């Protein structure tokens, strides 16, 4: 009896320590374009994606913080990723979207040029960022390799971290 | 009888503060909704004047507004605590102090049943302790001195609380020796808090406020009670944090009155909405002392700082657009609106372009990402759904010190002269290509540049993009997606287009159509068919094109 019980406990313990590894192998990402490059963000950090709406400028902040907007009663900061990545800023087009990301205790909208698609990628297909771009304040989580292209996966916590 | 007492005991329940906070947030949403509803009602009323359903709508809207306001007050009340909670510890403190200082002091408390928000009750405790300690130590003289001066041997400190509008006022009155403005000036000079010129120009009232400067202490000897130079500046910061105002009055030999004016609640406040170029800001009404409209030539410049003589006071002036580096899109006229803000004891005049009005606003945080930006206390959502930032009055006063702009010189700036007719630009909005061509042909002799749009929405995005600087816009009324009336009223929403010529070109000749055109902001109304010469002359007139 005791042995049997031990077996059950062991099995339960195993389940706690190694929760379903199979699903964890694949990461789901949302891809989008900024400038000429494709980036991606884990789908679970995205609260929603909305079409551009009116925003209010906030003074005394770096230029990549465009302002704040009203998302159903919440005031949310809007960040221009083009400017954040030191790219030439361009006018909004019909494809422009705000990606609203939610972190542990922060939320912000990010303006991107255009969405591409949802991507499923295996974890072992993601490489750490090359040493040469390590200085980018840890904004890059890794490089995802696909059959025909590479995709830069952004670190959500770094995007949502205030750096001014 | 016994049953009765049992039921009275159950008249109260304990509720977690978090739940009340949540309730307050929801009420905030409701207030925003109400503001929005009122705004929509105003728009509807304008458009459908005299229609029957308006009355019914009016009834519904006003009853919703009324109930919302009542609900807000009711919920606010659940968070209210009597100030007695803080006041109660003072009799003992004064008793202890009077024994320690060997003075006979009596504390008289009135209005302890006055209620205010829980969070504020918690915050005002410390400042009051400091003020009362100071009154005991520095204010009230010892028994002998008092008798010599012909006063009662026992000194009195009065602690009063009462409501005044949306504020609560707490008064600390002592009948001690009062503040000596000259002594305060000398002492501050000695300590290097002010320079000699400041000391000379300072009014008595300003001199009293010196006690709030960090590092200041009037007491000759350092006692265990006070005189160590910390304290009163902490009072100031704490009261400012609550958006409160401190007022001091004193008379030598008679005593000192310190008045703290604090808003009842922190979550929903009354604010003055002001416009600066295309942006709007909300200034907490508790800090607004008055608003005045002045001609620009009443502004004087002293050492690069702009000042205004307002009655018998000299007021420093600063433009809100300079503090927040607002993009300049249109020229100011020769008058300016000045919002005089006062916080604790300092005053500042803020120049804005327009006064929008007073509104009840719900303070929303901008999240961790934008927390603690200089000069911004938070944000609110207005009736039209847009976000408006709330000005942090205390920070604004600090920011204003670093701004040196000669307002007068700045306004006498140049207007880019237009030389040839092609420097002028006209936008033609019409869904029919033929009509657009006719208009283009009519204007062609003038040599003005022309941009075309096929409907209201397209026109609006062209205008918004800022690519062109239009001198006039010709608008057809009947168009798909967005009609001419809507377009005109949308354009008029931008302050920089307040004076832009909008010319309606339409085949609707009726009087009511014309009226609607005027209402939506059209400056001219041309009915089709028209002769090319007529259109040309109207355009010429509207853009003030010099005759050839």
Image (cartoon, coloured by chain):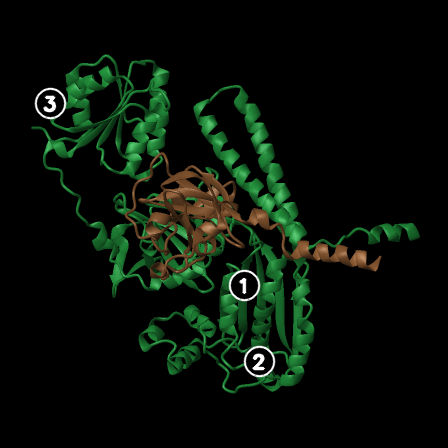
Chain colours: A brown, B green
Q: Secondary structure at mark 2?
A: helix
Looking at the picture, tell me which residue is in the foreground, B19 or B212. Answer: B19
Q: Chain of mark 3?
A: B
Instruction: Report whether A156 appears left or right of B412.
Output: right
Q: Secondary structure at mark 1?
A: strand
Marks 1/2 in contact by CB < 8 Å: the verdict is no
Task: Tell me the residue that label 1 is attached to.
Answer: B260
Residue B211 versus residue B365 in the image, above or below: below
> Can residue B274 be seen from the camera position used here?
no
| Mark 2 and mark 3: Cα distance apart in space | 87 Å
Task: Tell me the residue that label 3 is attached to.
Answer: B445
Q: Chain of mark 1?
A: B
Q: To which quarter of the image does residue B430 belong? A: top left
Instruction: Report whether B437 appears left or right of B131.
Output: left
| Mark 1 and mark 2: Cα distance apart in space | 20 Å
Task: Tell me the residue that label 2 is attached to.
Answer: B137
């Amino acid at each position: 009896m005791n042995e049997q019980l031990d077996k059950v406990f062991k099995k339960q313990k195993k389940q706690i320590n190694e929760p379903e590894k199979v699903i964890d192998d694949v990461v789901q990402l949302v891809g989008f374009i900024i400038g000429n490059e494709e980036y991606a963000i884990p789908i679970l950090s995205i609260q929603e994606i909305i079409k551009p709406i009116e925003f209010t400028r906030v003074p005394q902040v770096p230029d990549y913080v465009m302002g704040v907007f009203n998302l159903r009663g919440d005031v949310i900061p809007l960040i221009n990723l083009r400017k954040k990545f030191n790219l030439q800023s361009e006018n909004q087009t019909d494809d422009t979207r705000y990606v609203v990301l939610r972190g542990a205790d922060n939320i912000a909208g990010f303006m991107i040029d255009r969405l591409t698609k949802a991507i499923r990628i295996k974890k072992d297909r993601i490489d750490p960022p090359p040493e040469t771009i390590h200085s980018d304040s840890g904004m890059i989580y890794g490089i995802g390799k696909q059959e025909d292209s590479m995709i830069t996966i952004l670190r959500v916590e770094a995007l949502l971290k205030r750096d001014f | 009888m016994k049953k009765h007492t049992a039921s009275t005991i159950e008249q109260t329940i304990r509720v977690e503060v978090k739940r009340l906070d949540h309730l307050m947030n929801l009420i905030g949403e409701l207030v925003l909704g109400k503001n929005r509803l009122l705004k929509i009602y105003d728009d509807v009323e304008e458009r459908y004047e005299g229609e029957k359903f308006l009355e019914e709508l009016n009834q519904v809207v006003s009853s919703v507004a009324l109930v919302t306001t009542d609900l807000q007050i009711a919920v606010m009340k659940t968070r209210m605590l009597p100030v007695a909670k803080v006041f109660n510890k003072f009799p003992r403190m004064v008793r202890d102090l009077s024994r320690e200082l060997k003075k006979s002091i009596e504390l008289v408390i009135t209005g302890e049943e006055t209620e205010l928000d829980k969070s504020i009750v918690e915050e005002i405790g410390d400042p009051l302790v400091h003020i009362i300690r100071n009154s005991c130590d520095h204010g009230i003289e010892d028994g002998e001195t008092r008798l010599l001066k012909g006063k009662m041997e026992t000194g009195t400190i009065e602690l009063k609380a009462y409501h005044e509008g949306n504020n609560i006022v707490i008064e600390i009155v002592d009948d001690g020796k009062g503040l000596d403005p000259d002594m305060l000036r000398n002492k501050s000079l000695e300590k290097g808090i002010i320079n000699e010129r400041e000391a000379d120009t300072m009014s008595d009232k300003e001199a009293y406020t010196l006690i709030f400067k960090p590092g200041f202490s009037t007491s000759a000897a350092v006692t265990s009670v006070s005189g160590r130079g910390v304290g009163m500046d902490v009072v100031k910061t704490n009261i400012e944090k609550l958006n409160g105002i401190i007022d001091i009055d004193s008379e030598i030999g008679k005593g000192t009155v310190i008045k703290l004016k604090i808003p009842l609640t922190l979550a929903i406040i009354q604010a003055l909405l002001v416009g600066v170029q295309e942006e709007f800001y909300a200034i907490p009404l508790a800090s607004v002392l008055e608003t005045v409209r002045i001609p620009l030539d009443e502004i004087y410049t002293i050492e690069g700082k702009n000042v205004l003589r307002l009655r018998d006071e000299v007021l420093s002036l600063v433009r809100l657009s300079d503090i927040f580096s607002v993009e300049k899109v249109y020229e100011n006229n020769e008058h300016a609106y000045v919002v005089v803000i006062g916080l604790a004891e300092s005053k500042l005049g803020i120049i804005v372009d327009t006064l929008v009005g007073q509104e009840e606003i719900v303070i929303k945080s901008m999240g961790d990402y934008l927390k603690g930006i200089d000069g911004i206390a938070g944000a609110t959502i207005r009736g039209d759904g847009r976000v408006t930032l709330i000005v942090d009055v205390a920070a604004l006063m600090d920011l204003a010190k670093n701004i040196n702009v000669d307002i007068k010189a700045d306004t006498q700036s140049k207007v880019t002269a237009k030389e040839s007719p092609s420097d002028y630009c006209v936008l033609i909005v019409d869904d029919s290509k033929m009509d657009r061509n006719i208009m283009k042909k009519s204007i062609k002799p003038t040599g003005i540049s022309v941009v075309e749009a096929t409907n209201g929405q397209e026109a609006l995005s062209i205008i918004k993009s800022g690519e062109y600087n239009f001198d006039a816009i010709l608008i057809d009324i009947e168009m798909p997606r967005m009609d001419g009336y809507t377009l005109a009223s949308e354009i008029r929403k931008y302050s920089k287009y307040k004076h832009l010529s909008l010319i309606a070109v339409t085949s609707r000749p009726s009087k009511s159509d014309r009226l609607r055109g005027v209402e939506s902001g059209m400056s001219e109304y041309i009915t089709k068919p028209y002769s090319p010469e007529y259109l040309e002359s109207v355009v010429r007139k509207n853009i003030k094109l010099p005759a050839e």
